[in-house]
Image: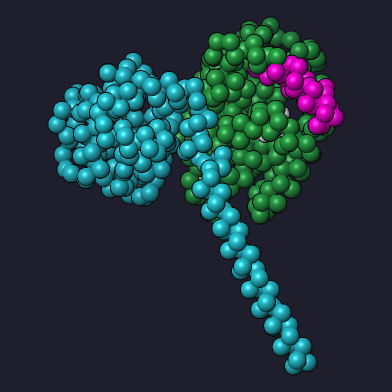
Amino acid sequence: MTDTNKPGANPPSTTTHFGFQQVPIQDKRRRVAGVFDSVASKYDVMNDLMSLGVHRLWKRFVIDLAGVRAGEKVLDVAGGTGDLAGEFARQAGPRGLVVLSDINASMLGEGRRRLEDRGLVNLPTVQANAECLPFEESSFDCITIGFGLRNVTDKDAALRSMYRSLKPGGRLLVLEFSKPVVPGLSRIYDRYSFKLLPLMGRLVANDEDSYRYLAESIRMHPDQDTLKGMMQAAGFARTLVYNLTGGIVAVHRGFRLDA
Amino acid sequence: MSTPALLCAAAEIALNRYLRLEAAVLDECAELDGRCIEFMLPAASLAMTLEFMPAGVRITPQPPAPPEVRVGGSPTALLAALRQLAGGREGLPAGLEIEGDPELLDRFRAMLVRVGFDPEEWLAPLLGGAAAHRAVGSLRRMLGWGRDTSQRMADHSAEYLREETRDLARGRDVAAWMDEVDHCRDALDRLDARLRRLEGSAGDKS
Ligand SMILES: C[S@@+](CC[C@H](N)C(=O)[O-])C[C@H]1O[C@@H](n2cnc3c(N)ncnc32)[C@H](O)[C@@H]1O
């Protein structure tokens, strides 16, 4: 399944996957937006339930590994409800700059509200598509994309766009569902995500289809090695994969090292 | 021979926290940008490379470029080296096998001394607090450390994260938090009383 996403594995075509369905490329963006529009307000509760609370630990790992320092400029792409951006804002401090961006206005709105609840009021939010980020070249010390890349239609374009927006020496961290590397875990995980997830989606968010899409999109996302190769193809150096929770989730980190 | 990525991450995160304590040390990291030291612990089949960069160091399982210096040794020798570091003593410790240019290694040692690097604290997130004391105190445990920890780290990232990042509440943290809440309440009560007094006295005057 993951093969379908290997760079160059697909013949040029006008369709792309939406979960397990093939849809016209223009449609995917709209449909993904639909999914996140409908889950925005319940998103956090679902995140906790879906990952049994572990998503906080995964994000914590990204925050630690990003090692944002006071005064740095940070961009959180597909930042949704602002979990990562909020923490980065604390670390970057008043001399730094943290931008929260997402393609979806209702997720951004939810994110802004939640950041305000935490007393973070001066974070710029930018509605932007990860594939063509509207920032000047070499703008950021650190860019993160947490559970966002799998929703992006043209992942290679998104990686290139993030590379461009990084300053030389800057780092990109991609947090995404991946392929379990522990034997036996795959089967259990399949059951969980295809049976339990949509059920929880129905019970909590009253939206079984959106959560079925999430489960399917996770399975269609490139595996660790494929994504690492895609990052290298986009120009990233020192690319390393960190498997968390047996590879259910992986963090990929790469640096822009050109002068 | 290499080290699981998560173990490298844990070492990098903890080490950078130290290095970032001193702006001058970070400047030196920037000056050494791209230069590498490889550390090897053959008894535990572990090797990792430290590469300097402007924001500190990057630790990877494989050397990104041929390292300028390789340091290896038995766990006893590495332990002695860590102890010597903690003591802030000059010079490279005996018993380590050093291949290549020792100057870079010595500069790194001096940086660690400057930021007050404490090996026990450094090992704590990898091992859990109590185990770090035992590891630094006992050679046998240190020997076991490499083998067990690399596996443990790979399997139980959440465990590392709990200790390291305190994301999951621990009893004593909850107690400390409750104290703060009490404190906050008292302060609020005092503020409330003061406001009432002020309002009262303003009322008297008008
Ligand atoms: C699963 S949420 C992740 C939110 C947040 N980063 C987190 O970890 O909680 C995925 C987000 O990706 C956004 N998204 C989807 N396609 C995108 C694109 N092409 N460009 C930017 N954001 C996109 C969605 O709107 C959604 O908010």
- Residue drawn where x is 83% and y is 26% of the image: A202
Residue B67 place in picture, x, y as percent? 29, 24
Whether residue A39 is visible to the viewer of this picture, yes or no, is yes
**Chain represented in cyan:** B
The kind of secondary structure the magenta stretch mainly shows is helix
Q: Give yes or no for residue A202 being in the magenta stretch.
A: yes
**Span shown in magenta:** A192-221
Please identify the quadrant where the C terminus of chain B is shown. Answer: bottom right
Specify whether residue A103 is in view: no
- Residue A246 image point, x, y percent: 54, 19
Colour pattern of the rendering: by chain
Residue at the location (39% across, 25% down)?
Answer: B149
Shown colour of chain A:
green
- Where residue A33 sits in the image (x, y, percent)? 79, 29
Please indicate whether residue B158 sits to the left or right of residue B108 in the image. Answer: right
Q: Is residue A204 above or below residue A194?
A: below
Quadrant of residue B194 within the rendered picture: bottom right
Q: Residue furthest right?
A: A206
Nearer-the-camera pick, B196 or A76: B196
- Residue A74's place in the image compared with A211, above or below, is below
Ligand 1 quadrant in view: top right
Residue most extreme to the bottom:
B205
Is residue A71 placed above or below B100 in the rendered structure? below
Q: Residue at x 66, y 71 (%)?
A: B189
Viewer-nearest residue: B114 or B46: B46
